[in-house]
Image (cartoon, helix red, strand yellow):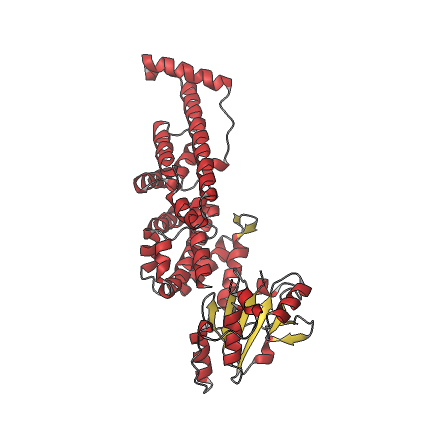
Amino acid sequence: MYPHERSLVKQLADKPFALIGVNSDSDLEEIRETVKEKKLTWRSFQNKGGDEPISDKWKIQGWPTVFILDAEGKIRFKGHGAADKVIEECLAELGHEVVIQDAESEDPPNDEADEADSE
Amino acid sequence: MYRVGAMLLAASLLIGCSKDSAEKSAKTLPTKGENQAVEKVVEKKEQEESELTSEEIAAAASSAFVKLQADSRKSEAEFMQKVQSAPREQQMELFQSGGERKQFAAKFLEWAKKYPDSADEFTAIQFASEKGDETVADEAIKLINSKFINDDRLLGLLNRYGMGAPPEQKNEDFLQNLIDNSTNPAVKGSAIYSLAKMLQTVSEAKGMMADQPEMKKMLPQASVEFIGKDFGDLNPKLEAMFTDIVDNFGDVKLGNKVLGELAGDELFVFKYLSVGKVAPEIDGVDLDDKPFKLSDYRGKVVMLDFWGDW
């Protein structure tokens, strides 16, 4: 999971694209460690907050669940599978032609943290 | 990630068949009195069956049922033990083989036909309908359709379909018959909810199957065929079904919730969280407790990822 996300963020660094997480872990300290260790550069909401968890309001039934929102905030994809094609489509509408490469075909970025994820 | 999704779906499809309702309604062992009644029955049988009093027949029926149930439970426990001790990669296949459930289903049906209108008739028929081979299950469903479509005990079966019945033609037919013909609002509402959840599974499974043809091997053939059918655009149908539930069957219980709440959640998803709708705002804090909003990213393509590091 992380290699794919990291690779997306890297490939789309100069495009109008943002990966935003909603993190459901209960131990905040632990997840801060993970973020540091695994070099997860994107921002995440804490799921618990306000009057109800975000995942309850969004009726999330399984993890991970991914939504792709276009530039107008419209939901373009919702599911558990790969959404790369939809991301490409949304970027194309903004005039950015991109072909997203699979994470697997990318060289893993440098350290042992990655080997830990691929298990 | 795909594989996980497929496994989850396959697992959810199996839920319908993995819990033994007949075994849940545990009965005590036959009492001495019942045993004596059986002996008496056996003795009398050699003379003439018509001489049995209705009490004696009831006692014989009950005692035969208790024995059948105990045998079935024992066999199931041994089977599950075998599944659990099998190598991980064989567990799924072994589990799907179902042990001796089919044989017991046939016995339960036979019992139900031999002692019609007994106290445990419904339980036996239900077991046969869920665990039997095609012939047994079909016959059991016919019995339910002819005798029990208004019976509150159907709710137990429908409750277990809370995640949606396994998507198969015969399950759709069964639920549709209850929707069309049951006069019990609890049964009717639960059947609509169950059918809607089943069609939702179909809708999701269609997409997954297109992405991962190997998923077909994990599902029963009847499900593969059913999911492959042309249902047209399912979303308006589903929205209408959930609206019907909220409007007319809101108070019906399912587990510790009511159908109105469950169907209301589904409608919320249709209105605000489906493809094509503008996503709701998220106003929260990041992992360093700094506030930010989803709408801060308007103008960009956003991948919103509900994740956890488990």
Q: Quadrant of residue B94?
A: top left
Q: Residue furthest bottom?
A: A95
Give the quadrant of the C terminus of chain B: bottom right
Q: Nearer the viewer, residue A117 or B274?
A: A117
Q: Give the total of numbered labels.
A: 0
Q: Nearer the viewer, residue A55 or B191?
A: A55
Point 36% across, 65% down: residue: B210
Compared to residue B167, the image places residue A56 above or below, namely: below
Q: Nearer the viewer, residue A9 or B185?
A: A9
Point 32% across, 38% down: residue: B136
Q: Residue furthest left?
A: B135
For residue B153, say whether it is visible: no
Q: Quadrant of residue B67?
A: top left
Q: Nearer the viewer, residue B40 or B264?
A: B40
Relative image position of residue A64 (x, y in whole percent): 52, 64
For residue B118, say whether it is visible: yes
Compared to residue B131, the image places residue B251 above or below, namely: below
Relative image position of residue B207 (x, y in whole percent): 39, 65
Compared to residue B116, the image places residue B155 above or below, namely: below
Relative image position of residue B192 (x, y in whole percent): 43, 53
Relative image position of residue B119 (x, y in whole percent): 44, 30
